[in-house]
Image: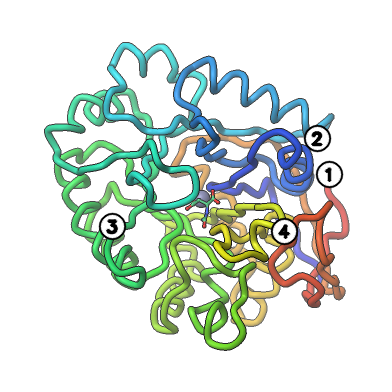
Amino acid sequence: MSITLRSPLDMHLHLRDAQMLTIVAPLSASSFSGAIIMPNLIPPVSSKEDVLAYKKRIMDSIGDSSFTPYMTLFFKPTYTRDFLESVQDEITAIKLYPAGITTNSEGGVSGFEIDDLRETLDAMSDLGIPLCIHGETGGFVMDREAEFVPIYEKLATNFPKLKIIMEHITTSASVDALDKFDNLYATITLHHLIITLDDVAGGMLQPHLFCKPIAKRPEDREALLRVALSAHPRVMFGSDSAPHPKESKEAPGCAAGVFTAPIALQRLAQLFEENNTSFDNLQKFVSDNAQEIYGITPIEKTVTLSKKEFTVPDNYDGVVPMSAGEKISYTIDSIS
Ligand code: NCD
Ligand code: ZN
């Protein structure tokens, strides 16, 4: 059996910088047509110069692969309309992090008073720049995302023309919010469709499955599966592939992030098959919905996968992927 995916897109990707960039960027660039590139570098990507320079470093690291890095800025409530107008042609979205909530987010937003955000969000809304949000509060770790839902709803109500993307949703509460507001969208990762907290910490601790938001309960995973497998039109695949050096993962103070980019399409094919779901829906989940939501036309790329066992490498130049050493039932056969 084989499947052909047309122009796969990863709508939430961490490519990092320097040596890590040179390891991970070619892996995404070979099998995806494009990806939304997260801006949480140190320091964060927050000026036009930063965007252009980072984009160049990405292009330099992928050689002659055809791949579009859809660039983002790190949200600051001080961005003015003039600034946004000057940068809008270089970016596809702006990513908002609550301050300190995850890796490299210290410069994020410390409150969600509408009046403090209004100038920037009105301008983004008028200019048609989508807002991607890492939606977690500072509360108890399992409740952070559900506690953030009222903030999503407040933003969606106050800025009805702003496209708001709830990034890497992990709870049934976020799935429920999707259908309450026409301007709310979501990305879902591969790992949150597969694991629950039990896989992370139910037995021996699995640092390579530790990420923000933390994987939740079986019923949450079921809710995510329901909208991903049915290719809900406001849901897109975003891997949140977040590589860290092995020493930072296999350590006390393990860094948050699961590295999935090089296995994502193969494992998604297996997941859709295991759930007896049409590959037409996989096509929508990994590309068509995102094209519609973001209004983008990706580079044409055809990825053919076949039902042949693929053993996930133990590491990619020292960076450990999810499911390292395990077998996946689909392999990428050809990319053209
Ligand atoms: C991400 C990272 O490492 O940059 N980590 C993660 O656990 N997902 C940041 C993020 O998306 O939260
Ligand atoms: Zn992320």
Does residue 289 appear in the picture of this structure? no
Q: Earlier in the sequence, mark 4 or mark 2?
A: 2
**Amino acid type of the residue that numbered disc 4 sits on in the rendered structure:** Lys
Q: Nearer the viewer, residue 117 or 224?
A: 117
Q: Nearer the viewer, mark 1 or mark 3?
A: 3
Quadrant in the rendering for residue 253: bottom right
**Amino acid type of the residue that numbered disc 1 sits on in the rendered structure:** Ser
Q: Nearer the viewer, mark 2 or mark 3?
A: 3
Q: Earlier in the sequence, mark 1 or mark 3?
A: 3
Whole-Å distance between the Cαs marked 4 and 3?
Answer: 28 Å
At mark 4, the secondary structure is: helix
Q: Earlier in the sequence, mark 4 or mark 3?
A: 3
What residue is shown at x 40% (from left), y 41% (from top)?
106
**Amino acid type of the residue that numbered disc 2 sits on in the rendered structure:** Ser
Whole-Å distance between the Cαs marked 1 and 4?
Answer: 32 Å
In this rendering, position of residue 155 left or right of residue 98? left
Give the labeled residue for mark 2.
Answer: 65
Quadrant where the C terminus is found in the figure: top right
Judge whether 301 appears above or below 117 on screen. below
Whole-Å distance between the Cαs marked 1 and 3?
Answer: 43 Å
In this rendering, position of residue 143 left or right of residue 205? left
Q: Nearer the viewer, mark 4 or mark 3?
A: 4
Res 246 label: 4
CB within 8 Å, label 4 to label 3: no
At mark 3, the secondary structure is: loop
